[in-house]
Amino acid sequence: MRPYRSVTGPLVLILVGVVFLLQTLSPGLRWFDLFVQYWPWLLIGWGVIGLIEVCIQFSLNHSLPANGVSGGGWLLVVLICALGFSAFEWHRPDTWWRQAGFDRSMQAFGQEHEFSVEPIQRTAGRAPHVVMENFRGDAKITGIAGELVTVAGHKTIQSMNNHDAERANTQTPVEIVSKGDRIVIRCHQDRAESRTTVTTNLDISVPKGASLEATGSKGDFDVSSLTGDVDISSENAGIRLQDLGGGAKLDTRRSDLIRCTNMRGTVDLRGHGTDVELTKIAGQVTMSGSYGGSVSFHELAKSVKVENLRTDFSVQQVPGEIRLERGSLSMNNVVGPIHLTTRTTDVTLDNFTEGLDLSADKGDIELRPGRLPLGRMNVHTGSGNIELTLPQRAGFAMKASTESGEIENDFGSGLQQRADGRGAKLEGSVGDGPDVSLVTNRGRISVRKMTGEVVNGRMALLPPVPPIPAMADKW
Amino acid sequence: MINRRGMFVRAIRGPILLITIGTLFVWQQANVISFARTWPSILIVLGILKLLERIASPVAYVPPPQPPAGGFTR
């Protein structure tokens, strides 16, 4: 039999020849970009050719190669992978090293050029719908009396030289366009060449009744004193909303801070971010996504539903506060029923009313309901201690068990305690009251009496929560 | 000694691996799933091919004593 010679080598030669011929004939083609985009197909193509070759040899009963791909071949494969992968990473807009800040220092090789944006005005009626598209830069949007939309500010243009910056400045005028009942604020930042980056920072005043719809790529939004709805979606933004009459829908892919203060409508957060602060919200609050920093809620008048990373909870009202951080969740002065499931989090609940359903995979749980009458409680943790502190006159039907650990009981003989293997059980009733079930697979359970007296259904030790004047009518 | 079917499975190992790796990188670039999460499937494919090789030629492969490298007549 004739020794087998692969056709892959000649095919690669032909391919390289064709590529170079095409390049000499039409220099406009961007081979690097094509390679960056399609290099994995080279491997697939090579594999398919090799496979077909072997199949043909086999069916023709010719001799077979020892390996479909030789040692040198594999070296080439590794080379292609390394080249292609690094080229692709280099080209990607949101790769890790760009996020780590290398890109900014790369851009810093150019210079920043400042240009002012002359104020422009347009009559817009009392309640226009203001739209900003693909905005890059910081925007401060304020509602004022009247029917005028006013835009002013400045541009920061990053480029290698003055000439490029001047050209980019003329290419990217700021305009106010009215389209039916919409007012569109355009910055034309996409017209600039790819080597220059145009950041437009705007101070925008709009009629009080306006609603806002904005999409941004990077930059902060600061919105205040509007009565319409606000809908912002951004790749990367810090968002601050204040004194808004309508609902807010915020969708971010990255964000360092989302802060909403004194809002009369609903707040809906989606996406990814870091810190979230919601204070004095009269409408419902929903939050779903991953916000990895510290999340705090104060004075929320309606129900709250949160699905954040691996912690989900819902409560009916938050006159006090909720604070969620990595590894810990605390609530003080909230109105239930509370539903809470979490993976690995220490949970501390103070002064909560109505029922509680709590399930944690791992974490210590401290519960101090503080008020009478008690609500029904159903608490489970896979691994962790449970400490329940109840007012002295509390009535309840207890059912507590730990599979491995001890139980401490301050309520005396009304509750019967017995050992159960390595764990313990506590059952019985004190007075008349709802079911309280505490279960941990591994950990100590403590049922304690609160020191201090309950006055008017509240603990005297706890300062009363001041009413919220602005929203008193809503409660 | 290894038989002809075993040699066939061994010969298609390289191309099949290439296609697998290529596909994983295509997925990575299309943002379907990251290569960092899919690479173990290369091991699985390799294992399956090895297994097929064993099944195709059940007799253990004894390398010829001389010469030690490339001692495999084409």
Image (cartoon, grey):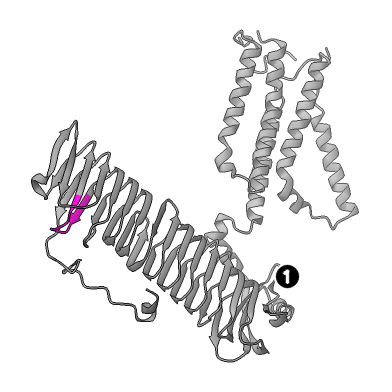
User: From the viewer's perspective, is A409 left or right of A441?
Assistant: left
- Looking at the rendered structure, the number of numbered marks drawn on it comes to 1
Image spot of residue A59 (x, y percent): 81, 16
Image spot of residue A32 (x, y percent): 75, 52
Q: Quadrant of residue A198?
A: bottom right
Q: Nearer the viewer, residue A75 or A472?
A: A472
A469 to B68, vertically: above or below:
below
What amino acid type is highlighted by mark number 1?
A: Glu
Q: Residue at x 55, y 91 (%)?
A: A145
Q: Which residue is mark 1?
A: A193
- The stretch of residues the image draws in magenta is A387-396
Q: Nearer the viewer, residue A58 or A345?
A: A345
What element does badge 1 sit on? loop
Image spot of residue A58 (x, y percent): 78, 17
User: From the viewer's perspective, is A310 left or right of A112?
Assistant: left
User: From the viewer's perspective, is A430 left or right of A165?
Assistant: left
User: From the viewer's perspective, is A205 left or right of A133?
Assistant: left
Image spot of residue A153 (x, y percent): 60, 85
